[in-house]
Structure formats: C-alpha cells, structure tokens
C-alpha cells in the first residue's frame, strides 16, 4: 500500500470510545495508523502499547500540533468537543468528533466557519446511521412491502449504570437522551421518512438529569410514532428489545440492536441484517477514511448531525414548556 493512502489518526482522550474505535480500526489493514493523546502520558502510552499504535502524546494540543498527524478523533467529554475541534481545524487537521458532537446547535456555526477556512473536514461519529439494520429498513420501507407507513415504535429501553463523566451535567451537557438517545434520534430520523416534529414526555420527577424519555414523533408523510429511551428500565438479557413499524399492508418487527427482522406484508421474510458490522462502526470509518483520502463529503453530513441535535433541543424545550405550564396551572 502506498504511503499516500495511510492516515495518521490521533485519539484525543483514552476512554471507552477510544478502546472501541481502536478495535474497529485494527481491522483496516494498515490504512490507519493510530496514535494516542491524554493528559496522563502513562495512560496514552498504555493505550498505544495495548492497541499496537504508532505513538503517544502527553497532551491533546501536542497531538493536534504534530506534523505526523493528519486527523484527530475527539473522544473526550462533550464539554471539550468544540474547543478541541476548532483547535484541530486551525492546525490543519481533519476532525472526527464523538456524539453528542457539541453542546448546542449554535456551535455548528463556529465549526463550519472554521472548517471553510481550513479546507479540512469534520465528521460526526454517528455509527447508527451506518447500521445494516437501518439500511435494510430504509430499503423495505421504500419498496412498499408493508404499504404506507402509519406507526413507528422504537424501543430503546435498557438499564445502564453511569459512574463516569456522563453523570456530571457540566461535563456531559445533558442527560440520557442527549448523551445516548441522540443515536436513536438519528435512527428514527433516517428511516426514509421525513421527521417533521417531536414532543418529549419525561416520566417521574423532573429533578436533575433525565434518565428516561418518551419522544412523540410526527413525519411529513403522515406517519406518527414513539421513541422510548431509558437508562433505568431492565430489558431481557440486558439489552434485547423489540421494535415495530406498521404499514397499511403489514408490519416489520425487528430486534432493536439489529439481530433479526420479521417482515409480514405483500411478502413474508425473515432477515438477518448483518452481524459482522451490527453496530455500524466499520461502515462509518470506511466512509470517513475514504472521504478524507478522496476529498469528498461523508454520506453522514454535518447538516444531518446538526438536525439530530436540533431535534434533541426541541424535545427538551417541549418538556420544559409542559413542566412550566403544569406549575402555572397549579
């Protein structure tokens, strides 16, 4: 493989996301050389050894300013995403930023402005967009196999213990829907239907950060739906859940993670969407890496990522408004 096709990528932050992405990138056959940066050099060196990397940095800025590095992957708590993204762009680096990418949609304006000046690209690591399950659902809906869509019921209930920065509002920027549910917002927004409006309903006490949320969905094509998201609802085998899409001619039942699908419509089908890349990480990185090497946009664009965050903001705004109205009426 020619040297020109090798991408030198530095991870900013050495936590779970970096662990996960390092394992995925190890299967890219040398197309990506990974480097690790942390405020703790011992941790960076540990990750570099563990994942057979090509170097370690004692700070995020050292990696950003290094001539060896072509791109950075921002894998720190969300409160740091904007500053590190802007710094990397000013240093002439491509940027992959973990989700949720930024704290507000206004931050996208600053990023896009800096991106235009730098000539580099910014990608948001939304793996759900690249899931084989979502791709298969789009194809089925478009085929008309279950007719016009009436209802979408997305079940993302699980029990998830939070003991790190995700439990700190100042670092995470929001609760469960913001930190994890944003992936599912992307999912329901990319079924091949046009998400038109949303409304949030928060169960239980509204004190502190949200751990559960029901999101009402309305699509421009006429379908309506619900997204159930939770970090405090036990599910079978700690994650097995069933979701369903209903049409005028039938339905599609699918395991929410993407293990299997059952189609009952003009045809009956049992589908295994794809185990090899069930989470979509390989498809996501393949698109991003090729986009950087060829100078083309990724399939999942910054505008799409901005729309996801805007949807989250609309959900929270609707919950806040309903809470305020309830207090006023009492």
Image (tube, rainbow, N blue to C red):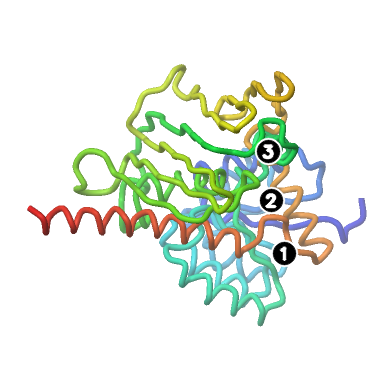
Which residue is under mark 2?
A: 34
Considering depth in this image, is 215 or 167 the residue closer to the camera?
215
- Neighbor class of circle 1 (other Cα within 10 Å; few <14, some 14-19, many 20+) is many
Q: For residue 226, which quarter of the picture?
A: top left
| Residue 64 against residue 261 in the figure, above or below | below
- Residue at point 41% right, 22% down? 235
Q: State the residue at coordinates (37%, 41%).
A: 214
Mark 3 → mark 1, Cα distance in angstroms = 39 Å
Q: Which residue is mark 1?
A: 70
* Contact (Cβ within 8 Å) of mark 2 with mark 1: no
The residue singled out by tag 3 in the image is 141
Between disc 3 and disc 1, whose residue precedes? 1
Element type where label 1 sits in the image: loop
Looking at the image, residue 102 sits to the left or right of residue 328; the answer is right
Which residue is at a point 29% across and 53% down the rendered structure image? 319
Indicate left or right for 177 with 96 as reference: left
**Vertical side of 299 occupied by 259: above or below:** above
Task: Between residue 162 and residue 206, name the one nearer to us.
Answer: 206
Residues at marks 2 and 3 touching, judged by CB atoms closer than 8 Å: no
Element carrying mark 3: helix
When the figure is inspected, residue 162 is found, relative to residue 327, above or below; the finding is: above
Pick out the residue farthest to the front. Answer: 248
Q: Nearer the viewer, residue 13 or 216?
A: 216
First in sequence: mark 2 or mark 1?
Answer: 2
Q: Position of residue 271 (x, y in %)?
A: 71, 22
How many numbered circles are shown? Answer: 3
- Dot 3: within a 10 Å radius of its alpha carbon, few (fewer than 14), some, or many (20 or more) residues? many
Looking at marks 2 and 3 on the same chain, the residue that comes earlier in the sequence is marked by: 2
Question: What x and y, as percent, mark residue 186?
Answer: 55, 49
């Amino acid at each position: 493989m020619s040297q020109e096709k090798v991408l030198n990528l530095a991870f900013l932050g050495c936590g779970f996301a970096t662990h996960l992405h390092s394992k995925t990138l190890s299967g890219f056959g040398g197309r990506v050389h990974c480097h690790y940066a942390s405020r703790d050099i011992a941790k960076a060196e540990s990750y570099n050894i563990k994942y057979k990397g090509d170097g370690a940095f004692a700070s995020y800025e050292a990696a950003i300013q290094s001539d060896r590095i072509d791109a950075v992957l921002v894998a720190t708590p969300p409160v740091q995403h904007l500053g590190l993204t802007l710094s990397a762009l000013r240093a002439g680096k491509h940027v992959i930023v973990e989700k949720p990418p930024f704290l507000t949609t206004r931050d996208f304006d600053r990023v896009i402005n800096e991106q235009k000046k730098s000539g580099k690209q910014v990608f948001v690591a939304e793996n759900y967009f690249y899931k084989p399950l979502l791709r298969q659902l789009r194809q089925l809906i478009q085929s008309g196999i279950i007719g016009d869509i009436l209802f979408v019921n997305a079940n993302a209930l699980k029990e998830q213990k939070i003991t790190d920065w995700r439990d700190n509002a100042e670092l995470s920027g929001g609760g469960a829907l913001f930190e994890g549910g944003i992936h599912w917002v992307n999912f329901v927004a990319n079924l091949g239907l046009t998400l038109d409006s949303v409304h949030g309903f928060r169960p239980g006490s509204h004190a502190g950060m949200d751990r559960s949320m029901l999101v009402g969905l309305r699509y421009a094509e006429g379908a309506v739906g619900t997204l159930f998201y939770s970090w405090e609802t036990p599910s079978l085998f700690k994650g097995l859940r069933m979701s369903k899409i209903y049409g005028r001619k039938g339905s599609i039942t699918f395991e929410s993670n993407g293990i299997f699908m059952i189609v009952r419509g003009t045809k009956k089908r049992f589908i295994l969407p794809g185990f090899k890349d069930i989470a979509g990480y390989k498809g996501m990185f393949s698109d991003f890496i090729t986009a950087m090497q060829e100078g083309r946009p990724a399939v999942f664009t910054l505008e799409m990522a901005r729309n996801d965050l805007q949807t989250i903001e609309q959900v929270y705004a609707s919950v806040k408004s309903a809470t305020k109205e309830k207090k006023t009426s009492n």
